[in-house]
Image (cartoon, rainbow, N blue to C red):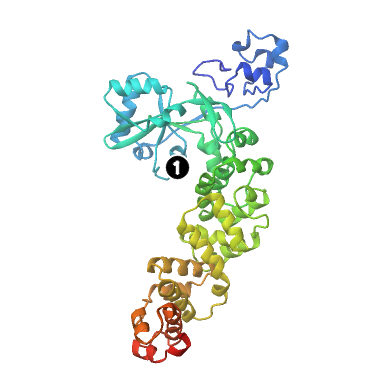
Amino acid sequence: MVCGQGSKSRKNSCLRAITVKDLANGTVQTSCREPADRCCTLFGFWSSAVFNSVARKSVCNQLHTMRLSEDQMAQVLSPEVRQLAQLFSTHGYELRIAGGAVRDLLMGKTPHDLDFATTATPDEMKSMFDAEGVRMINAGGEKHGTVTARLEECNFECTTLRIDVETDGRHAEVEFTKDWELDANRRDLTINAMFLGLDGTVYDFFDGSKHLSDRFVTFVGDADTRIREDYLRILRYFRFYGRIAERSDNHSAKVLESIKANAEGLAKIAGERIWVELQKIISGNHGGELLVMMAECGVGPYIGFPENFDCAGVKAVYRRCREASIPSSEVHHMTLLAAGFASEEEAIRFIARVKCSKRERDLLLHVIQHRDFALQASSFKEVKDHLVDIVIGERRNKDVGLLLTSELLKYVGRVDFLENLKNWEIPRFPVNGNMIGEKGVPRKQTKIALRDTLEEWKKSDYSLGSEELLDMLDVKQYQ
């Protein structure tokens, strides 16, 4: 049951479904401006005594609309989108673009993905698409209200308007609705809660367009409520702050207090979901400041950071990159994050929490293991030797060696060495195991002898040939 007038022309309405369970628990919230005893006619069958015993918060919201230009709409109105819109219109259902695409258009960006919201239920969409001969894929989304239609090699996710009935901080049990404001109210941030009609009309219930203009990031309604619906929204807040905010210190104090109060809830969230968000925070705008703010809000221990996360180290690595004119977007997220860990053991616990890839794991540990060397390196010769040790000494792929070495140089801000590295080709090591064996070195000692020979080759700055290196080999020490 929904609290509201039901009129399409209304400006203000209650923002959530009212259920008998809500009344029993005393958790009803509404945006009605009317006094409690006149909130709406749907409460008529409850006595005033019962109604007045319900704890309510009053939040007033006004729908703002605006019209996008033809040029803006041309970025989303492909022939396939027009075809999809016509299908819904013909069958009497509303269809609007939702969320991120609306935000991007208002920021002057071209959306990469389009998500659609509709008044049609999944069953109604399936019947409609079947009748029109439209193929559907990914049936698994139907329980959440999403039906994916395929038109002319394009996939379109269409999701029924919905409200959250029950949430556990990770998942939500939803009910479908035809009220656009109710659906907007369940979304995370005001900048993500707008809809775009296919006629170019933007529907904004929570001042998302103004917040975009002000480069201000905040939650829809009560921050505590939004966060407790899905604790991952804490990280989404920081990610979008990096994308939207012009200053690193323009957070709402109330939002930060809500994050501090609910940080422990992130312990419920799967590591893979945390890592997807965290990577974008690290490499985005204000990445260093946001990592520090997250630590100060108590988020760190619940996403794998150590208790003593090195905020000073994080600030220093971002500062070095900035001073060296290396954009954070061009530095691997693991390179930047490494500054927060004091030891490999701390990093290994983080890796176990977020379940990152082996490549990411190797990079994080490599930077931690060798950052002191990189900070102290005074000549490009030392950098060359480091790369040779990886590619020839450890027999690792050349591309892997270049990645590990270049990221290490970015960590310390050595753009001069980075440029030299781009122009240096690793020479071929002139000695192999067979040559060592032919000199009389026992097979069990071949690896050690090769290592020693490699060291001599490095000392010569890679100038010695195979004969000279083998002549220098003291076979007796390997007997």
**Which quadrant of the view contains residue 374?**
bottom right
* 80 displayed left or right of 266: left
Q: Which residue is mark 1?
A: 104
Q: Is residue 138 left or right of residue 206?
A: left
- Tell me what residue is drawn at x 46 percent, y 29 percent: 144
Please tell me how many numbered marks the rendered image carries. Answer: 1
| Above or below: residue 200 compared with residue 290 | above
| In-front residue for pair 186/427 | 427
Instruction: Label 1: state its secondary structure.
Output: helix
Instruction: Judge the density around disc 1: few (<14), some (14-19), many (≥20) Cα neighbours within 10 Å.
Output: some
Q: Is residue 286 visible?
A: no
The answer to whether residue 224 shows anywhere in this view is yes
Say left or right for 327 vs 227.
left
Amino acid at dot 1? Asp
Rendering coords of residue 262 (x, y %): 66, 40
Q: Write down the quadrant of residue 158 in the picture.
A: top left
Q: In the image, is residue 363 above or below residue 125?
A: below
Residue 80 vs residue 232, the one in the foreground: 232
Q: In the rendering, at what x and y percent does residue 29 appear?
A: 64, 24
